[in-house]
Image (spheres, rainbow, N blue to C red):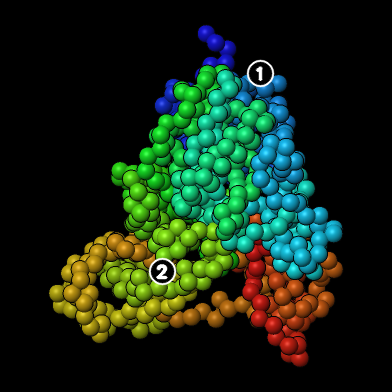
Amino acid sequence: MRSDVIHTLLVANRGEIACRIFRTCRDLGITTVAVYSDADADALHVREADLAVRLPGSAPSDTYLRGDLVVAAARAAGADAVHPGYGFLSENAAFAAAVQDAGLVWVGPPVKAIELMASKTRAKELMAGAGVPLLAPVEPATAGPEDLPLLLKAAAGGGGRGMRIVRELGALPGELLAAAAEAASAFGDGEVFAEPYVERGRHVEVQVMADAHDTVWALGTRDCSLQRRHQKVVEEAPAPGLDDGLRDRLHEAAVAAARAVGYRGAGTVEFLVSAEGRPYFLEMNTRLQVEHPVTEAVFGLDLVALQLRVAEGEPLPAPEPPQPSGHAVEARLYAEDPARDWQPQTGALHTLEVPEGPGLRLDTGYTGGDTIGVHYDPMIAKVIAHAPTRTEAVRLLARALERARIHGPVTNRDLLVRSLRHPDFAAARLDTGFYDRHLADLTAPGADRDPATAALAATLAEAVRGPEAVRPTHPGGPAPARFGAWRNVPSQPQRKRYRSEPDGTEHEVAYRTPRTGVPEPHEIPGTRVLTATPDRVTLEVDGVTRHFTITTHADRVHVDATDASYTFTALPRFTDPATHTAPGSLLAPMPGTVVRLAEGLAAGVAVEAGQPMIWLEAMKMEHRILAPASGTLTALHAAPGHQVEVGALLAVVQEDPAATPVPVPVPEETA
């Protein structure tokens, strides 16, 4: 038996990518080993693995970034190979060397290739020698107005972390500091470089797969231009709208890059394509990409299986890759609120159900009942659609997302559906500024939504269940007290109040329960109740029959219609004055860790409106808390290292009435 045949594989990662790798291992008869932090003790990837090893702690720096602990875990579990997934240690040459030094098979490229491509600055020097087109670097210390706008990037790692766009020279020092701090936190390397920022550029990449027998495949192109915070949101293959000459040039450059470093395994060569159609090398990711499923769908391949095959020393199945077929689109479902500066969200994910069917695929690290925590990336799942044409694939994906049942934290689901149906996306007018231009429209209340009717359905379902079915909870205490001899009279109109999430719009619904016992809307013309049960309501609205599924979790009510989903918070009849906070209170917008305070910040100091005061780290990103007004800091409850929950009081600013008010958003995302 060959010594490099893999029997037991440890995945040095978590969540969705670990689950995805385990799926291929099961198909190949390979035993799987998970590693997990304390925060992930009950995570799906742990439940799906054959064996699991704990990495004590919760922060990535104490767990998934500790190569020594991961190698020790592989030895303890009897693994003979390690797959790094993406992120964390996947592009860490020292970790790859440590795996091999321990006598384990490394399912990744050669250590030398990782070293050469690990630093984007050194990689660009190498690519210049290979004839790959590049953007000229800019020295930040000598940058002038003619160099603007600039793009700051972390030399190590990816995923948009440590990346900033600078449009004013005065902002350059602060953005360099913030980018370096974020890069050091994410990758353990604070090196940052600058290059020209190309307006309206497209992010196009080429998937490569190489073996140790001098075969290199270029597996088509992917467009990943729809991005937020420089992190991809929607990806597709092949990249639409490229002429044959440009596509061939990208393929040739990607193969040249792979050969220049003696590459083996799966990798991705990323390019920026200008509005004029000129390609520029960005970086080579020496790992599997998040968006690899769209390439798998179009080429009919399992890239993880090919990675394992190459790691075992086998050649690729043929000198040339298979012919592509059709079009594939992937959307990343995130626990975040796009309308509030993409703030990551946490909490219990009560339900995650995505329709199944031909051409649809779901890759996820969660199931209903899991909890989305603060320590890691907020991606819940990837939904992929494959069809004969781009139009069909986009339509299939949008409808699958629209029909999905997702109950829990706020997600970007509605944004994804609207993005896929936007005229610019439909016409393949793609560039990395898509959300800069369209976010306000994509997150605004739309004519395609009818929360009032959904609130009516929720009210009728509750009325059928009875008055004790939903008891709105009082923040921090028991349910509101009842009042003396006051009572509802069932034959009279009853009223129910809801707050729509996450926009905060309130809805009041009036209904009656006549002698028939079937509740009916009060003074809502054109609406008739056809059926009403505790979990399903059918209404006729202006002659059109509509179905609603209602699910309740504590005071949250989720209403899923055939064309949209709604989340409401059931409100008490009377407002409790204790729920109000003092003017000038700065509350944590999300759970996180206080990483630093503004220099000299202390109770009693003067602050200016819009001044950054407190930095929170949540889900691998830094968030600034800004002073809401000019005045005096009267209280400071935050300190570096403190863990805070959403809504925690961080500080209080007493406004100076004489100061000129400056409208500023609170908080502001720094990335």
Residue 637 in view (yes/no): no
**Residue at the farthest front position:** 245
Mark 1: secondary structure: loop
Label of residue 442 in the image: none
Q: Relative to 340, is 607 above or below? A: below
Residue denoted by label 2: 568
Q: CA distance from mark 1 to mark 2?
A: 55 Å
Q: Name the amino acid type tagged 2.
A: Phe
Q: Nearer the viewer, residue 478 or 555?
A: 555
Residue drawn at 74 percent across, 51 percent down: 136
Q: Relative to 171, is 97 above or below? A: above
Residue drawn at 54 percent across, 64 percent down: 435
- Label 1 close to label 2 by CB (< 8 Å): no
Q: Nearer the viewer, residue 92 or 615?
A: 92
Residue 600, percent from left and from top: 85, 68
Residue 130 in view (yes/no): yes
Residue drawn at 39 percent across, 83 percent down: 484
Residue 509, percent from left and from top: 33, 79
Residue denoted by label 1: 103
Crowd class of label 1 (few under 14; some 14 to 19; many from 20; radius 10 Å): few
**Residue at the farthest top position:** 1
